[in-house]
Image: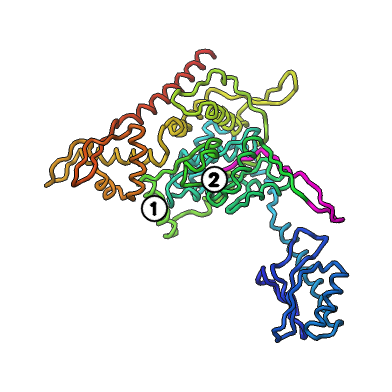
Amino acid sequence: MALKTTNPNNYEYVTNHLEIHVLGGIKLNKLDSLRVTLSINKTKHHNKLRHNIDLYNDDQVEKLVRKTAERIEIGTSIVRRTLQELTNELETYRLSQLDQEDENEFTIRELTKKELRAAGAFLKKGNLLEATNDLIGNSGVIGEETNRLLMYLIFTSRKSNNPLHCISLGSSGTGKTHLQSKVAELIPEHDIVDMTVLSENAFYYFNRTELQHKLILIEDMDGAENALYPLRELQSKRSITKRVSHKDRNGNTKTIKLTVEGPVCVAGCTTQESIYEDNSNRSFLLYIDESHEQDEKIMQYQRKLSAGNVNIDAELKAKRQLQNVQHLLKKIRIVNPYAEHLQLPQSVFKPRRINAHYLQFIEALTFYKQYQRERKYDEATGEEYIETTIEDIQEANNLLQEVLLRKSDMISGACRNYLEKLKAYLKERDSLPPSGEVPKAMGAFTNAEIRRNLRIKGTTLRRYHKQLIEDNYIKKTTNNKYKGYIYEIVSYEEYTELQEQINKALDDCIQLMQVSQ
């Protein structure tokens, strides 16, 4: 009877005389041995023998033959022949699985001449970023106009010398993972390493250059928490090293060095911004749009899809076009002749790291527009390079306004989202007082009112209010024994003023560069 491998943890091999189970399956990566755990008994009998053995070791096999024959009272020739047949079956199965793994590896698709011309023409468009964003939308990414373009450029940076990283943040069920996976579909499959659950040591067992210039996608950072340290090292140092003990064929223990090299581009999703501060310091933070307008856009698309009114072929065509563009982009050195004129707003926290990210993003944008740049050569080294333009910096500034604003904010992203919703609710409430009720003091509110109208859990609301009071965004005014504490907003305009400060600082730099040109 043939080997049954339906259950990966319990293969079955049944003959007229013996019933053998291979417990735990077999390892595919050690072809010089075939170590298995066997459960052996006579067919339709319950007297079992369990044994761990290397089926390639003749001495071990012969001992098992004699032990089996004695224990379950069967002839040695039957046991020997059955184990030989089982070994052949397992060997054939293992080789077939390895062949299947090779077939499943992504191959680099070669573009046709027509596709090469179309992708090249697209990269030479004058309004390249706008055209790219439109094409991303046509591929089925709904809304999130700024985030989706930022994410696509960050993913594209994996091919450059200085890859960027991003973390998508938002409440549960707001589409973080969906946005990441949809934009990742615009990247060729052979450049993506997709991960859901990852152990701490898993990174060290990739081939030395297997991850170089790859996009590493982490669906949920909570599921990869143990692997975040080596991942951070790979982001910062561009290589990780681990020394492990290993037994050679002679049984001698030796220490071997495992090294995995980058650079890599890393993207992940989480609802817990504060927990992953070390990772977020190395990444662009993209806050998901949780507005009612975005909800309506997505629901409308879902309705159209259900009604059969979405042009799937057009989406696939747009997706393929953006993938083709990625094939044409080649690693090249970027020189920013205006870098010394660039200044971050003083309000930005951790300016050294943000400044590095800011400059890297300008490089990534220039890298994407390489088909529109004159190739230049370093006189000393002969190295080819292209230069950043003022237009590149202006476009980078426009895209990074929200990112820099969040990086300048004293409170967490989730708390800021709540505060802006609270402001909007109070403005609407106070402009139209409910009929039949005593008008509330302008801006005053209680926990109970906010829980009821903004539908926020009490524990979450208290956590937000604690942070907002500590940082002087709201204040307690009175303590009503019937209604509890009454709060007020300290300033309705502080976020707008912060945005204006950032925009002015960026615009001043552009003007300075234009004057000095």
Q: Which callout, 1 or 2, points to the residue nearer the camera?
A: 2
Can residue 118 be seen at all in this image of the molecule? no
| Residue closest to the far top | 516
Residue type pointed to by label 2: Gly
Q: Residue furthest left?
A: 436
Placement of 217 over or under 514, stated as above or below: below
Identify the image quadrant of the N terminus. Answer: bottom right
Element assignment for label 1: helix
Question: Label for residue 300?
Answer: 1
What is the x, y in percent for residue 209? Answer: 72, 43
Write the start and end of the magenta stretch as one range.
246-268
Asked where in the image residue 144 lies, by quadrant, the reply is top left
Is 20 within the magenta? Answer: no
Q: Which amino acid does label 1 sit on?
A: Gln
Magenta-drawn stretch contains 262:
yes
Mark 1, Cα crowd under 10 Å, few <14 / some 14-19 / many 20+, is few
Residue 338 in picture, x, y percent from top left: 56, 19
Residue drawn where x is 20% and y is 46% of the image: 483
Residue behind mark 2: 268
**Is the residue marked by circle 2 packed among few (<14), some (14-19), or many (20+) residues within 10 Å?**
many
Q: Is the magenta stretch mostly helix, strand or loop?
A: strand
167 or 202: which is nearer to us? Answer: 202
